[in-house]
């Protein structure tokens, strides 16, 4: 039977010390410490603490052992204030780790109250601290009931930790109902002077905390059966100076002191000397077996009986007078500096001062090898319980190679479940030298780089791996190295190599159905697609999905996502949308936030290309709402997509608002590519709104040195937009130059089989030819565009291009080429023009539209249909007359009804007749 299932292990430890099953949190850190049995009520301090409810911050700053935490805990209990407590340690300086605990503690009070902040923790890279602080503060501000948040041992955080920046951000605009209490041995790096000047801080300091003579008498009243005299108490007070920890040590030592007065007389000297003396006195009063056992437990930051037995493996309960259970019983009865950590009293920790004193004793009585053995045994036990971070921490204290072994043994678990930040935390605990010398650990860094798409970092890792001996007998490591080689080769344009490496990654570990295998299949599919083997890519993905085992959801989401990627690159909008939805469904079912966002993004891009702008806006808004946990490049594209959709729907104000949000996001994440993308999109929006000068300023300084493969399936590609602006609004020379560049780009894209970009680039080619008066060539290219986009109904590029292509499309339609698709494009364009008129958003690419909105807003096609309605023709008959589909007729009728503000044919005819609309001449086009 494994230790994890042995009866001696507390239930709270079966997944680690009070851990949540889906998170590596030590939940005992979230418990307010109970008051000690010898607690003395100190009303003067409780009254001073009451001011905490009048200000956003209370700072309790004093030295070790002064009773800070007990005072705050007593105040919360006495006053009945609801609050959350977080006991910090030196590893909580990591912002992500700190936030995990903070969210867990606050949500224990109000479940679901910090959903936005919690979602940010899923980001591959945490957003800027200011963004986190804003989310955190806004969510706390929803509460109206006064509440308290206590951060204990705040001094343990590194002075350079981003946590301080978060607290500073919180205190700039603190929520009215929440009151923060920091308990620290030293002043935190906050603007305390400004807070004092603004009357926003309550302070309790070293001079406030020493015990008075009356309080000292109360604390020591039970230490000596016969009691202590007034002079004895005064003498103790003089020597210990009211120091809480010292007084408790005095109380423990007094119990067995044969001569109290002599004992007190020997307390002279400074406090450190007094402390050492008192510690010696306390230990000498304890049974030898107990004190020896006690000293060895100093290596543990928290403990339970089973863990105590584990660090004493040679102790047999049947033959020794001390084991973990017996020790805990004696510890509770001895009134030593022990703090219960859970309601069941299974987990405990020592007061920090007492633990440090024990550690000093340990170094005196045990050899380094003996201390190392204690840490090693603790590490082994924690690893068996699944508490990997604690196992690593103890191993690092004695043997960094053993710590690295632990990471290597457990690395696959966070990788399988998309818990990248957990793996990052483990790696951060190891020295850099060991991480660079072990292939398995280097590959862990490779995974983290791959999910940030840091191709340069991955390339360096591969070069380093080439200088190390990778265990060829380990299929996982070999597969991962091949996978990273595939990724780097793909983004560097070496597609045949990428395909070879991805296939090697799959072949070396056949049957694998984890996240890593899914990524390999994804890149194999992308490499096949870009080399012209789309059918093979799709066939292989479907075959893998058919045999995917149950419980392999991260693997399956990547296969389905790969299907959507390949379909989109191949221009198959409907299938891309379908598989995007499947990705979302699987991801939601299995609580996988990143695949969910990717699925929604693909659905949004497919809808955008099809010209379904309202639907696109709704879909991509999910991505912008979660921008800070999403891929940065994709999030920027989502902002652009929503902004453009608002523009195409005639809502200029919303378009500009979303564009501003996208720019702010790009500036927040400080990514050069992100900033370039939103700058391009802003120029695109300016062009659509008629501000050609601004758009041209951007285009004339924009570089077009971009690798075509990096265009992927993005809505906004600066290189393409540069040509769009110069062809649409530039000089003849600029148009001619850009047209040549577009032809060259189209050739490159055709070689890469990127139909999703070939279509809009070919539309730009036709537009450029038309602008230069080469109408026959433009018409030929436009027919090619229709061949490419008609079957998949790629409407958006045609709608955005506007005149003169719209006129050419009408002419092509009369020849019978792609008539139904062209009619759909014309209908969509009519809607866009009408929307642009309403939104005053007409750009240089669209025809003149009257400034006013009214009955004359009807397009030529809508007037045709209105006249045929008056002749009592049915939809099918109208379609036959106009050579359009019944579906297109219905679309036009819907817009006629909206513009006339009627709901049926009869009312439409009546209103048009009453206003004379049917007799009027049509508006100029």
Image (cartoon, grey):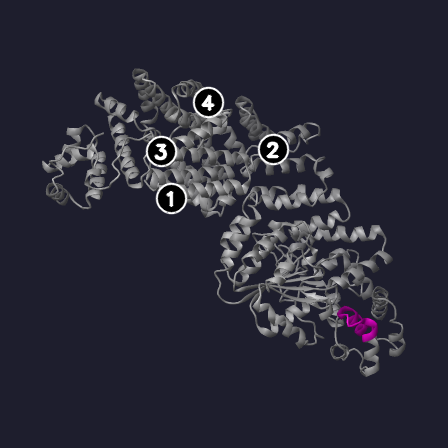
Residue 302: horizontal and vertical position, in percent?
70, 59
Q: CA distance from mark 1 to mark 3?
A: 16 Å
Extent of the magenta region: 237-253
Give whichever of discs 3 and 4 has the lower sequence position: 3
Whether label 1 touches label 3, CB < 8 Å: no
Mark 1 or 3, closer to the camera:
3
Residue 506 left/right relative to 366? left
Give whichever of discs 2 and 1 has the lower sequence position: 2
- Dominant SS of magenta comes to helix
Residue matched to label 4: 752
Q: Is residue 394 visible?
A: yes
Q: Is residue 742 or residue 15 the one in the foreground?
A: 742
Whether label 3 touches label 4, CB < 8 Å: no
Check the picture and name the quadrant holding the C terminus.
top left
Give the image quarter of residue 361: bottom right
Judge the density around disc 2: few (<14), some (14-19), many (≥20) Cα neighbours within 10 Å: many
Q: Is residue 11 visible?
A: no
Q: Is residue 248 magenta?
A: yes
Element assignment for label 3: loop
Give whichever of discs 1 and 3 has the lower sequence position: 1
Q: Is residue 297 above or below residue 820?
A: below
Q: Is residue 731 or residue 863 the one in the foreground?
A: 731
Residue matched to label 2: 480
Q: Label for residue 690?
A: 3
Mark 2 or 3, closer to the camera:
3
Give the image quarter of residue 433: top right
Q: Is residue 329 or residue 761 the one in the foreground?
A: 761
Residue matched to label 1: 654
Judge the density around disc 3: few (<14), some (14-19), many (≥20) Cα neighbours within 10 Å: some
């Amino acid at each position: 039977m494994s230790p994890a299932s042995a009866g001696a292990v507390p239930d709270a430890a079966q997944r680690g010390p009070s851990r949540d099953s889906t998170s590596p949190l030590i939940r005992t850190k979230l418990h307010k410490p109970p008051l000690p049995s010898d607690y003395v009520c100190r009303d003067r301090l409780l009254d001073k603490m009451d001011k905490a409810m009048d200000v956003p911050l209370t700072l309790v700053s004093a030295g070790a052992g002064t009773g800070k935490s007990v005072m705050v805990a007593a105040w919360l209990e006495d006053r009945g204030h609801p609050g959350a407590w977080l006991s910090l340690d030196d590893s909580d300086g990591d912002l992500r780790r700190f936030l995990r605990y903070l969210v867990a503690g606050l949500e224990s009070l109000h479940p679901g109250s910090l959903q936005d902040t919690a979602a940010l923790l899923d980001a591959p890279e945490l957003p800027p601290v200011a963004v986190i602080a804003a989310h955190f503060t806004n969510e706390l501000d929803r509460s109206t009931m006064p509440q308290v948040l206590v951060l204990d041992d705040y001094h343990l955080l590194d002075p350079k930790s981003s946590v301080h920046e978060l607290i500073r951000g919180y205190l700039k605009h603190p929520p009215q109902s929440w009151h923060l209490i920091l308990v620290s041995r030293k002043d935190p790096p906050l603007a305390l002077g400004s807070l004092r000047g603004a009357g926003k801080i309550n302070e309790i300091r070293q001079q406030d905390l020493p015990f008075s003579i009356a309080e000292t008498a109360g604390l020591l009243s039970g230490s000596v059966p016969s009691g202590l005299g007034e002079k004895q108490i005064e003498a103790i007070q003089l020597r210990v100076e009211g120091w809480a920890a010292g007084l408790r040590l005095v109380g423990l030592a007094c119990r067995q002191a044969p001569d109290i007065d002599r004992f007190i007389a020997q307390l002279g000297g400074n406090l450190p000397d007094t402390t050492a003396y008192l510690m010696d006195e306390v230990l000498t009063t304890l049974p030898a077996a107990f004190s020896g056992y006690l000293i060895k437990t100093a290596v543990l930051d928290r403990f339970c009986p089973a863990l105590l037995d584990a660090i004493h493996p040679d102790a047999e309960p049947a033959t020794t007078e001390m084991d973990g259970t017996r020790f805990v019983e004696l510890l509770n009865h001895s009134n030593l500096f022990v703090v219960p950590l859970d309601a069941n009293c299974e987990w405990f920790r020592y007061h920090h001062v007492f633990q440090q004193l024990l550690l000093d004793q340990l170094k005196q009585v045990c050899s380094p090898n003996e201390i190392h053995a204690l840490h090693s045994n603790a590490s082994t036990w924690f690893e068996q319980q699944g508490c990997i971070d604690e196992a690593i921490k103890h191993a690092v204290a004695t043997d960094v190679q053993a710590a690295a072994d632990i990471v290597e043994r457990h690395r696959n678990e966070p990788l399988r479940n998309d818990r990248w930040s957990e793996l990052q935390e483990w790696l951060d605990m190891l020295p850099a030298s060991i991480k660079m010398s072990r292939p398995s650990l280097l590959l862990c860094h490779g995974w983290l780089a791959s999910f940030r798409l840091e191709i340069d970092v991955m390339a360096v890792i591969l070069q380093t791996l080439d200088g190390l001996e990778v265990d060829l007998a380990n299929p996982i490591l070999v597969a991962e190295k091949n996978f990273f080689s595939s990724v780097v080769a793909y983004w560097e344009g070496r597609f045949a190599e990428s395909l070879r490496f991805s296939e090697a990654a799959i072949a070396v570990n056949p049957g694998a159905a984890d996240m890593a295998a899914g990524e390999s299949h994804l890149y194999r599919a992308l490499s096949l697609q870009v080399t012209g083997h789309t059918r093979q890519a799709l066939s292989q993905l479907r075959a893998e999905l058919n045999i995917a085992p149950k419980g392999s959801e991260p693997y399956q989401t990547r296969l389905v996502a790969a299907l959507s990627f390949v379909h989109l690159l191949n221009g198959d909008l409907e299938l891309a949308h379908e598989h995007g939805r499947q990705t979302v469904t699987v991801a939601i079912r299995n609580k996988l936030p990143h695949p969910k966002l990717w699925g929604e993004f693909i659905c949004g891009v497919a809808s955008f290309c099809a010209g379904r702008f309202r639907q696109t806006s709704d879909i991509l808004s999910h991505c912008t709402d979660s921008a800070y946990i999403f891929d940065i490049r994709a999030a920027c594209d989502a902002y652009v997509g929503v902004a453009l959709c608002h523009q195409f729907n005639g809502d200029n104000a919303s378009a500009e608002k979303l564009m501003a949000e996208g720019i702010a996001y790009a500036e927040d994440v400080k990514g050069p590519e992100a900033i370039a993308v939103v700058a391009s999109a802003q120029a695109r929006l300016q062009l659509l709104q008629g501000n050609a000068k601004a758009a041209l300023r951007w285009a004339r300084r924009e570089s077009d040195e971009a690798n075509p493969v990096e265009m992927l399936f993005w809505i906004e590609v600066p290189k393409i937009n540069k040509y769009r602006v110069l062809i649409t609004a530039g000089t003849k020379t600029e148009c001619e130059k850009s047209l040549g560049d577009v032809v060259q780009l189209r050739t490159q894209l055709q070689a890469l089989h990127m139909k999703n970009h070939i279509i809009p680039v070919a539309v730009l080619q036709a537009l450029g030819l038309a602008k230069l008066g080469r109408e026959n060539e433009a018409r030929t290219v436009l027919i090619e565009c229709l061949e490419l986009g008609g079957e998949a109904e790629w409407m958006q590029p045609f709608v955005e291009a506007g005149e003169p292509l719209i006129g050419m499309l009408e002419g092509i339609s009369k020849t019978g080429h792609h008539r139904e698709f062209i009619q759909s494009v014309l209908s969509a364009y009519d809607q866009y023009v009408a929307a642009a008129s309403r939104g005053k958003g007409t750009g240089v690419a669209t025809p003149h539209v009257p400034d006013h909105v009214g009955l004359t807003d009807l397009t030529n096609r809508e007037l045709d249909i209105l006249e045929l309605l008056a002749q009592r023709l049915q939809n099918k008959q109208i379609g036959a007359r106009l050579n359009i589909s019944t579906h297109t007729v219905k679309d036009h009728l819907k817009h006629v009804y909206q513009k006339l503000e009627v709901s049926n044919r009869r009312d439409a005819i009546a209103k048009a007749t009453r206003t004379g609309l049917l007799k009027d001449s049509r508006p100029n086009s």
